[in-house]
Image (cartoon, rainbow, N blue to C red):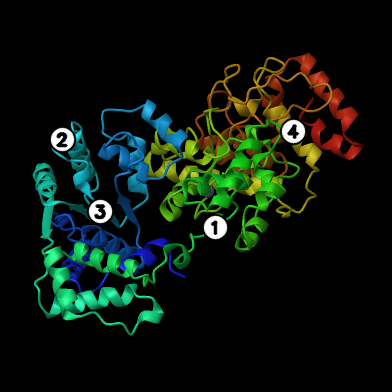
């Protein structure tokens, strides 16, 4: 089954047309340009000028199809007539396929550039092999006031993407304007002109080929006369696009057209990325082409999400949504998992892995939120060559559909994206990177011991209740019982209510403090304390942690005695007594033994 582009170009293109020579020259020139790579004065802009009816559009689609069928990444920018403004930058943003709310948010913080930095980051991160600008004359018509603005934006695109070949298709006048504008950017430009075909044997063969492609199977025998071909040439003046259109029309009039777009292609299926949550997948679906049934599913989904009690990630089980997708989605739906015990509520889960999001952008253009990030206590992503610290989404303004986008744009516009280390460290440069990786590896080890079933050390792993109790003591909310847990303020001071998920808690008497508000970095510190206390981290490793970290408060504790001292030092006597009483009341004797050392 052909995809939409394949089906379209299959019927529109003939390699016997005069434009085939331009296509071949263009492809070979682009491929050689790519191969040269480091050569400074290589061409990266190709201008294809062609009059109306010269087959400009068909050539642009054929070029796109050619590159896409080799699994290369193509960004195609075209005018979107449904938009009210005729501005190149605005259509460029549109072509990046971001959810509308995210685009709106970025636009609010627009800087000096024609596009915001976040867009440029996204465009470069996606690593396109080719950019196609279709019908560029639509943005640079002399009658348009915004024409010079569009030219500036094209100039900026060319200047910012010196390593990506850009092919611009335009009518000759506009092509000259663009040529003039980009000549100021020191870019190598190569121009091509589409010419009409002569009325000769080649034209005849081209018309017969186009006709053969368009003819219904039952009419294969019907021939076209020399006179008819002559007439087509005289009407079209040899212009390829126009001639092919005439053949198309005459076959349509005779009811002999074979090509039926609706029957010849099926929308490409969007598969979830490994571990992707259902809401994230729906968000990605919403910016792809959806069928009418899928659009219905989307409406039901949005309607359900408006109810606060509904977990958007569990909606794949909702019959009214499931029934909108046909059988080919069976496997897709089976891959989703309902968040279970130990998962944070949707609204409270804000941790994400920036490396996963960046990899998504490179691989599939759109970032995906992972279900695993919702697990309480998750602070490290182990899906990479070396462990990666999760970050916290700070904006509370996100919807189930755009959460991954919010995180991605927040990350690329924040200083964290430029930091090479995840913790404040004593060392600099290469040494700091090595120290950071060592800390991340240790954290990952404790995390898999806490969250997984793997037995890392000989002694029996403490129960979940013990681990949660201790983590709660070291990570308790700063506004709660007036003092923050030691692990929260180890690296940075804590201010009251500085968390987006801040909820004052007064339930201490019944349960240990919860730590769902803690950031991944704070959880990492508490894991080190846990690791030292239960020998998942060796004494030598604990000393190294102390040596490399630059703490805000006291140095990192390296044994149970020190952990007890720093852990309790932050709490008043009354709170300590309250904690001991709580442990005594809620834990069994064996569990009590495993926490009491830290409480008195
Ligand atoms: Zn990751």
Residue depicted at x 31% and y 70%: 251
| Number of the label disc, if any, that sits on residue 143 | 2
Quote the CA–CA distance across marks 1 and 3.
28 Å
Confirm whether residue 246 shows in the render. yes
Regarding residue 443, the answer to whether it shows in the image is no
Residue that badge 3 annotates: 164
Can you tell which quarter of the image residue 256 is in? bottom left
Q: CA distance from mark 2 to mark 1?
A: 44 Å
Per the image, the residue denoted by label 4 is 470
Circle nearer the N terminus (4, 3):
3
Secondary structure under the numbered disc 4 in the rendered image:
helix
Residue 435: image tag: none
Query: Which disc is residue 271 wearing?
Result: 1
Provide the secondary structure element on which disc 1 rests.
loop
Q: Residue at x 13, y 37 (%)?
A: 142
| Picture coordinates of residue 595, whole percent (x, y) | 80, 34
x, y percentage for residue 497?
A: 60, 18
Q: Is mark 4 within 8 Å of ligand 1?
A: no
**Cβ–Cβ under 8 Å for marks 2 and 1:** no
- Element at label 3: loop
């Amino acid at each position: 089954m052909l995809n939409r582009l394949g089906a379209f170009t299959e019927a529109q293109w003939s390699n016997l047309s005069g434009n085939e020579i331009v296509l071949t020259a263009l492809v070979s020139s682009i491929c050689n340009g790519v191969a040269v790579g480091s050569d400074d004065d290589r061409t990266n802009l190709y201008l294809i000028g062609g009059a109306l009816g010269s087959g400009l559009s068909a050539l642009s689609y054929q070029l796109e199809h050619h590159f896409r069928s080799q699994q290369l990444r193509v960004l195609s920018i075209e005018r979107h007539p449904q938009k009210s403004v005729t501005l190149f930058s605005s259509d460029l943003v549109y072509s990046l396929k971001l959810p509308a709310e995210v685009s709106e948010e970025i636009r609010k913080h627009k800087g000096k550039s024609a596009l915001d930095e976040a867009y440029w980051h996204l465009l470069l991160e996606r690593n396109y092999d080719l950019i196609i600008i279709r019908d560029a004359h639509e943005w640079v018509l002399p009658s348009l006031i915004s024409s010079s603005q569009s030219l500036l934006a094209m100039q900026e695109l060319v200047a910012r993407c010196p390593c990506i070949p850009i092919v611009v298709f335009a009518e000759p006048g506009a092509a000259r304007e663009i040529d003039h504008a980009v000549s100021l950017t020191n870019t190598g430009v190569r121009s091509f002109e589409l010419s009409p075909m002569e009325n000769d044997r080649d034209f005849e063969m081209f018309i017969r080929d186009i006709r053969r492609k368009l003819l219904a199977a039952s009419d294969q025998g019907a021939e076209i006369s020399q006179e008819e071909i002559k007439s087509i040439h005289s009407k079209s003046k040899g212009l390829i696009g126009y001639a092919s259109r005439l053949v198309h029309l005459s076959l349509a009039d005779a009811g002999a057209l074979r090509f039926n777009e609706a029957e010849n292609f099926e929308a490409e299926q969007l598969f979830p990325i490994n571990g992707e949550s259902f809401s994230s997948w729906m968000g990605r679906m919403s910016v792809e082409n959806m069928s009418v049934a899928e659009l219905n599913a989307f409406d039901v989904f949005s309607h359900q999400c408006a109810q606060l009690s509904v977990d958007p990630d569990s909606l794949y089980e909702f019959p009214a949504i499931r029934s909108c997708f046909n059988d080919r989605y069976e496997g897709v739906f089976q891959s989703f998992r309902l968040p279970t015990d130990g998962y944070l509520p949707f609204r409270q889960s804000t941790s994400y892995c920036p490396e996963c999001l960046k990899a998504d952008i490179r691989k599939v253009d759109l970032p995906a939120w992972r279900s695993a990030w919702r697990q309480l206590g998750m602070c490290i992503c182990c899906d990479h060559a070396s462990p990666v610290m999760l970050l916290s989404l700070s904006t509370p303004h996100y919807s189930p559909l755009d959460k991954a986008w919010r995180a991605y744009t927040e990350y690329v516009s924040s200083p964290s994206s430029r930091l090479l280390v995840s913790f404040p460290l004593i060392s600099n440069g290469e040494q700091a990177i090595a120290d950071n990786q060592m800390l991340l590896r240790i954290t990952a080890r404790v995390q898999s011991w806490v969250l997984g079933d793997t037995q890392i050390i000989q002694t029996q792993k403490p129960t979940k209740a013990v681990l949660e109790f201790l983590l709660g003591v070291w990570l308790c909310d700063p506004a709660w019982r007036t003092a923050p847990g030691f692990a929260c303020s180890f690296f940075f001071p804590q201010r009251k209510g500085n968390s987006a998920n801040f909820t004052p808690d007064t339930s201490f008497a019944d349960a240990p403090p919860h730590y769902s508000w803690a950031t991944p970095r704070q959880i990492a510190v508490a894991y080190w304390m846990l690791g030292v206390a239960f020998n998942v981290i060796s004494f030598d490793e604990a000393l190294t942690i102390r040596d490399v970290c630059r703490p805000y408060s006291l140095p990192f504790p390296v044994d149970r005695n020190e952990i007890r001292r720093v852990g309790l030092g932050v709490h008043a006597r009354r709170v300590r007594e309250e904690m001991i009483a709580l442990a005594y009341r809620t834990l069994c004797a064996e569990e009590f033994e495993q926490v009491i050392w830290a409480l008195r």
